[in-house]
């Protein structure tokens, strides 16, 4: 039931028409069709007090302190339950690599590796908050559409919560490794003859009809959790914001979350300025980039075609919210080719960092923006790697290199290989 939230109360608000809903609402959309935002009242603490509190929690033992999501609860969901559904997640590293920095032409580059989360992708950050809300609401089950990573995360957290899980994936477009994760955690997987966008459309209808709690990034609690990627990287940088944050963009949940997190951090006095966001899409799945290039014209869906399966999305659900994020951060949207993505992936993998193909779009995007002089000399950059190498161990960028050379067992054979 609609109920405009007071400024001191957590609530769901439609950014399009201003209608408010109780934070216990299960439908992620307003009656006007727009996606709802989770509005959290500004913390009563100063920026210095928040920084001190976050720092003190690094040595805490309670799961709400250990988690790299719930640690920042004043900015996420202050009404934290006694036992959130948490592994814990977060606490992912900021990695410096001279080899990757040289390839991009950017001296001051760090990689925020979200593939180090429990199920191998950033999805766990939003899932801990979304699944905790599902349990709080007494959901009978949870569901999502996925290109693989959301399904794995949903399945794991649902198992942790003791809830049945249903996931829809586009048939023939999800790697066996990602499908195996969902199956191992006990989720019921359904392969739909269609693309991700059709999966999301169907699963929204199914959630409404069968009383399942939908946990795609259309869910505002998912977005709330994903904001902590930004809170944590700022914390790791001692609240000294970089000039740029560059990341792959598909369904645009992270674009939305990052913009909201940066604005919230600035308003709370945690940072003195807002970094610029750079969302990177694959050329074959770039409706957001096309809209941006035309001055943010209305979204025109495309038939998505890219090697980067995690961002192979032609009709991003969070388009309107992502537009606001780019505008609020003076950000931009760019594209890279599949060839550039695979080249970047090879560089990241051979540097010993490793990532899935979609993650490499961020690194390829840094290189393109540096070559175009958009990223300037001396600019500090954080590129977000969204998924682990083992999500796609046989991706085209590394398949040839993964084949072992067979030998009979003579030292001269090894010597010949070393000489090569």
Image (cartoon, grey):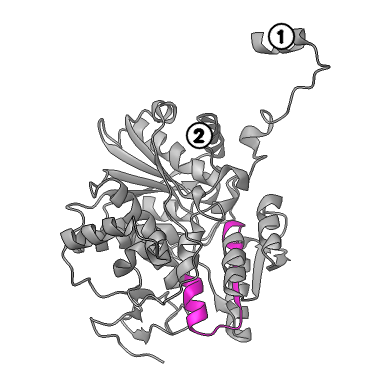
* Residue 391 drawn above or below residue 366: below
To which quarter of the image does residue 390 belong? Answer: top right
Which is more foreground, mark 2 or mark 1?
1
| The furthest residue to the right | 408
Mark-to-mark CA distance, 2 and 1:
27 Å
Q: Is 68 left, or right, of 205 in this rendering?
A: left
Relative depth, front residue between 84 and 390: 84
Which structural element holds mark 1?
A: helix
Instruction: Please report the residue visible at 62 percent of the width from the left and 85 percent of the height from the top.
Output: 209
Mark before the other along the chain sequence, 2 or 1 = 2
Relative depth, front residue between 271 and 57: 57
Is 131 part of what is drawn in magenta? yes
Q: Please give the range of residues in magenta.
A: 130-151
Q: Which residue is mark 2?
A: 348
Is 84 part of what is drawn in magenta? no
Q: Position of residue 217 (x, y in %)?
A: 48, 66
Q: Position of residue 299 (x, y in %)?
A: 45, 62
Instruction: Please report the residue visible at 51 percent of the width from the left and 62 percent of the height from the top.
Output: 87
Which structural element holds mark 2?
A: helix
* Residue 98 drawn above or below residue 148: above
Residue 416, labelled with which disc?
Answer: 1
* Residue 33 drawn above or below residue 389: below
């Amino acid at each position: 039931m609609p109920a405009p939230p007071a400024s001191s109360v957590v609530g769901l608000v439609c950014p399009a028409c201003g209608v408010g809903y109780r934070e216990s609402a299960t439908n992620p959309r307003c009656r006007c069709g727009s996606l709802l935002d989770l509005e959290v009242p500004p913390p009563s603490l100063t920026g210095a007090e928040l920084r001190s509190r976050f720092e003190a929690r690094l040595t805490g033992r309670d799961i709400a302190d250990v988690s790299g999501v719930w640690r920042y609860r004043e900015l996420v969901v202050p009404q934290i339950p006694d036992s959130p559904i948490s592994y814990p997640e977060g606490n992912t590293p900021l990695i410096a690599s001279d080899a990757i920095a040289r390839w991009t032409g950017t001296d001051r580059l760090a990689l925020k590796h979200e593939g180090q989360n429990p199920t191998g992708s950033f999805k766990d950050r939003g899932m801990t908050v979304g699944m905790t809300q599902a349990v709080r609401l007494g959901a009978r089950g949870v569901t999502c559409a996925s290109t693989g990573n959301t399904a794995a995360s949903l399945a794991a957290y649902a198992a942790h919560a003791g809830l049945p899980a249903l996931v829809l994936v586009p048939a023939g477009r999800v790697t066996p490794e990602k499908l195996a994760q969902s199956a191992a955690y006990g989720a019921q997987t359904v392969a739909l003859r269609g693309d991700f966008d059709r999966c999301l459309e169907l699963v929204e209808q199914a959630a409404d009809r069968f009383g399942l709690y939908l946990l795609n990034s259309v869910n505002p609690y998912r977005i709330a959790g994903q904001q902590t990627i930004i809170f944590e990287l700022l914390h790791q940088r001692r609240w000294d914001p970089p000039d740029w944050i560059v990341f792959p963009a598909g369904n645009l949940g992270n674009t939305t979350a990052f913009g909201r997190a940066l604005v919230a951090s600035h308003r709370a006095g945690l940072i003195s300025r807002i970094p610029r966001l750079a969302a990177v899409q694959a050329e074959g799945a770039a409706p957001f980039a096309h809209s941006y290039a035309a001055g943010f014209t209305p979204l025109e869906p495309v038939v998505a075609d890219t090697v980067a399966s995690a961002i192979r999305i032609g009709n991003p659900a969070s388009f309107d919210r992502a537009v606001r994020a780019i505008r609020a951060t003076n950000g931009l949207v760019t594209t890279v080719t599949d060839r550039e993505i695979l080249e970047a992936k090879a560089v990241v993998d051979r540097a010993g960092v490793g990532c899935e193909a979609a993650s490499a779009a961020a690194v390829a995007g840094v290189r393109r923006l540096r070559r175009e002089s958009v990223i300037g000399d001396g600019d500090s950059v954080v590129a977000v790697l969204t998924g682990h190498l083992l999500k796609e161990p046989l991706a085209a960028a590394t398949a040839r290199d993964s084949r072992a050379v067979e030998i009979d067992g003579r030292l001269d054979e090894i010597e010949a290989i070393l000489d090569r």
